[in-house]
Amino acid sequence: MSAFNAIGENVERDRNEYTPGLEPQPTWCPGCGDFGVLKALKGAAAELGLSPEEMLVVTGIGCSGKLNSYFDSYGFHTIHGRSLPIARAAKLANPGLTVVAAGGDGDGYGIGGNHFMHSARENHDMTYIVFNNEIFGLTKGQTSPTSPKGHKSKTQPHGSAKQPLRPLSMSLNAGASYVARTAAVNPNQAKDIIVEAIEHDGFSHIDFLTQCPTWNKDAKQYVPYIDINDSEDYDIDISDRKSAADMMYETEDALNEGTVLTGRYYHDEERPSYQQEKQNIGEMPEEPLAERYFDEDYEWERSYDMFLDKHK
Amino acid sequence: MTDDELIWRIAGGSGDGIASTSQNFAKALMRSGLHVFTHRHYPSRIRGGHTYTEIRASADPVKSRGDGYNFLLALGDSFARNPQENAYYGNEEVKPLSENLDELREGGVIVYDSGLLDTSEIEDFDERVEENGWHVYDIDLRTMAREHGREVMRNTAGVGVTCAIAGIDTEWIENLMRDAMPEKILDPNLEILQAAYDLVQEEYDVDAPDISVPEGEHDEEQVLLSGSDAIAYGALDEGCRFIAGYPMTPWTEVFTIMSQNLPEVGGISEQVEDEIAAAALAIGASHAGTKAMSGSSGGGFALMSEPLGLAEMTETPVVLVEAMRAGPSTGMPTKPEQGDLEHVLYTSQGDSHRVVFAPAGAEEAYHQTRKAFQIAYEYQIPSIVLYDQKNGGELQNVPASVFDEEPNGDIGSVISEEDLADAPHDPSGKYNRFQYEGENGVSQRSIPGQKGGRYLATGNEHMPAGHIAEDPDNRVYQVNRRMEKLEAIRAELDDGEVPNNTQYGPEDAEYGIMTFGSQQGTVEEAVDRLNDDGHSVKALGVSEMAPYPVEQVSEFLESVDECLVVEMNASAQFRGLTQKEIGKYGEKLSSLLKYNGNPFEPEEITEGFVTSIVEGEELPTHETKFVPAASD
Ligand SMILES: Cc1ncc(C[n+]2csc(CCOP(=O)(O)OP(=O)(O)O)c2C)c(N)n1
Ligand code: SF4
């Protein structure tokens, strides 16, 4: 019998199963886009029938980092920017877990940028949701890596001199095998995308546009969005890198001009996940590593038998 | 100085195979029945630049590199790039000879490769030879190697010459070569070994050897290994199957050994983007139910400060190893120092706590690494193995039976699924994973995937089920509970099950010498010599830095009139820690410090003791402080 009985125990579920009972009530401001992410994630988990106890939701710091306080599963609220390295190790240690990492644009594209690039590059089998509200929320409205050029804040009183970062292009170039953008204003599209991302065997990056009514009143995130996969104006092959790259570039420019394009941009179903690659070269056990510590019959090997001969 | 020992120094350029040759030679000497101890000195560059390794071999157990040496094999720096006129610091090519003369004992032997080295470039060489009664063998090792094989096999020729001069049976070397070398290079090497041996036999009078190697016998099987090996094997035996790291000298050795062995035992090794990620991965793997470790050296450990605090706050067990080298910043990458003690003790924000072990030699490193895992997993707290470039790199023979211990796959204080069903949950349905009650402050954790175990782990202060909270009463409960662990840990370490805080020398000695970590063996050797010279001294090698063994150290200090504290840093960090923890006996303590990039030799400690304690004079620390390393 497995030590982790919740894993694989998937039955039909209601989204309310992921609501943590009486407490705690979200501390997000009224109208915050983060509610949309929470709703979409609950919908996706229910649709997939995931047991709350086989899910591990790992977050960073920020308003966005509170996601797993209001989503009832196993959770790890880590430190600013570090959700990804923690999440990917948990997945390596126990591949049976459904691992979702989440955080803000400051958290994921700023302080955690290095981890973002490398997690995408390695193509870990996990889903990464970035709440992109183009602002630092929790520290009260400073300019973030995705804030538009000229954006004024208390720490950039003359307006930012920096180009905003291109998160979609960045993750594609770094090596993510699933890249999408969605928006809190439509949790239905968001839910579908999260479902697809969790099902995808590889690193799925979702740039999730969220509005921050408190600090970023003129963000485009309020604007009704266009779904590029549904619209006749766009013809894109999401299995093709080049096509995805062109579309992402256009999308990122369009956002700066105030037009919100969302949808699936890239889905590479061929590329093996990192876990698979590691197994192929013999550096990752077939059975979940974590199981071993709970298996009373497992025979632990001694260095005395294994390693010491070469020292004799 | 004793004559019943061989201290063989092989010198050359980095990349000339000094390390591998000396390792094999040391093993051959060990197999012949001797006790060996090696010391490595190398520059922070890849190819070229003066490097040497010393092997001390004796019939009696050896605990340090000793003082000076009595046999020099100078191979020449084949990668030397600086001609004398432009050289910033002397002629590099002859350094393997010129740089090593200061510490060569009177009557010692010099073998140099006349194919690469020209003694006329060394000022006063002949006078110094004359003065010191050195025996010089100029042998064209390079040509010999070329004739029978390849030039790089000069090493083997040098070993052959050594065997002939010192009367060592080449069979030990041959057997090792047969084990280690592929056929293609084995034959020429064997040929070179023999040719070199014969040449000395024929051309020199070896019946009256200038130096003879002692004979010895071990009463049980020995293995030759370094502190890094011992740390890695300790971790593996303790069931650690996950490591994440980023290379940094000298921690890289542990990381490499683990990475090479983990796939064999179904474990996972990850080289990641930086040290913040490395520590975070270890935490993630541990959270998901494995035994995990990470580590680095000073600069990389600085980046781990943040995940270290997270591990404490979320009560995620993790073991970090910290291999000290001279700092600050990148400092001297390949030189030992004990300057990261305070860094490791106090880094990370808030009232943060961790357990810190500082093992002395390979044997302690093995046991204490195992203990570090046991404590981390039992008490859900980060524990750190603090060592340095010296004990990480030096090889020592240890009885093989030391490692003949049961492996341990116990994951510590984790609740089972059956128990979860009856365990207290909060109204949200979450398991009260951080409940206030719990023996020794430990509250059992659940592992993601376990039924009925959902909780939130967070670096923020939290309620029993993990919900973030700033409730003042809860805050006090949680802080107290986390701190309660420390007392229990101290009690567990005091139970004497694992070798630690070793006292050495006559129980009733008048004076004491205290040290920590890698200097312990050298201090013990100094204590023996002082007592032989009629002084009354004992030593205490402290190997647990936090929680500090207050009782043991107090007893020791109570029992002596005065105590010299020996450590490799400039700000007396260990002495400072002792005074802070004990709060008395400060007037009994004086410091002997060294931080020029080389570890202490026993004689420096005996001299320091006599000057400071016996003669009551101010220690000439400025000498230790400001004289540059003899060969650097
Ligand atoms: C190392 C570190 N630096 C700074 C902070 C302070 N901090 C907390 S949240 C935050 C910004 C969060 O912005 P973002 O990631 O965009 O998330 P949001 O709050 O907008 O959801 C910062 C800088 C911190 N907690 N840790
Ligand atoms: S500050 Fe902005 S991001 Fe944070 S909760 Fe309020 S609206 Fe949401």
Image: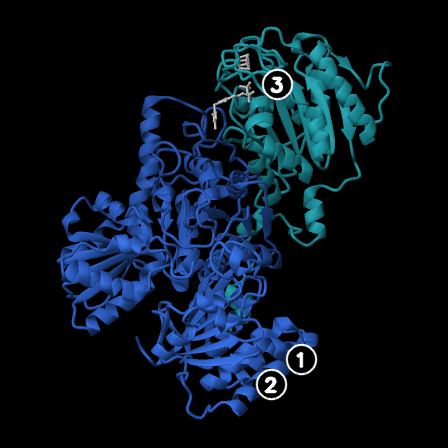
Tag 2's secondary structure?
helix
Q: What hue represents chain B?
A: blue
Disc 1 + disc 2, Cβ < 8 Å? yes
User: In whole angstroms, how far apart are the C-alphas of marks 3 and 1?
Assistant: 66 Å
Residue at the image point whose x is 44% and y is 42% from the top: B329
The C terminus of chain B lies in which quarter of the figure? bottom left
Amino acid of disc 2: Ala
Which numbered disc, 3 or 1, marks the residue closer to the eye? 1
**Vertically, is B225 above or below B443?**
below
Residue at the image point whose x is 71% and y is 14% from the top: A255
The N terminus of chain B lies in which quarter of the figure? bottom left
Q: Give the mark nearer the N terminus: 1 vs 2.
A: 1
Residue located beneath label 2 in the image: B195
Q: Nearer the viewer, residue A305 or B527?
A: B527
Residue at the image point whose x is 65% and y is 52% from the top: A283
Q: Which mark is residue A162?
A: 3
Q: Are marks 3 and 2 on the same chain?
A: no
What crowding class fits label 3: few (fewer than 14 Cα within 10 Å), some (14-19), or many (20 or more)?
Answer: few
Q: Chain of mark 3?
A: A
Residue B378 position, x and y percent, is 41, 47
Q: Is mark 2 within 8 Å of ligand 1?
A: no
On the question of residue A200 being in view, the answer is yes
User: In the displayed structure, does residue B136 sit left or right of residue A36?
Assistant: left
Q: Chain of mark 2?
A: B
Amino acid of disc 1: Glu
**Vertically, is B51 above or below B178?**
above
Q: What hue represents chain A?
A: cyan
Which numbered disc, 3 or 2, marks the residue closer to the eye? 2
**Vertically, is B570 above or below B605?**
above
Residue located beneath label 1 in the image: B147
Q: Are marks 3 and 1 on the same chain?
A: no
Amino acid of disc 3: Lys
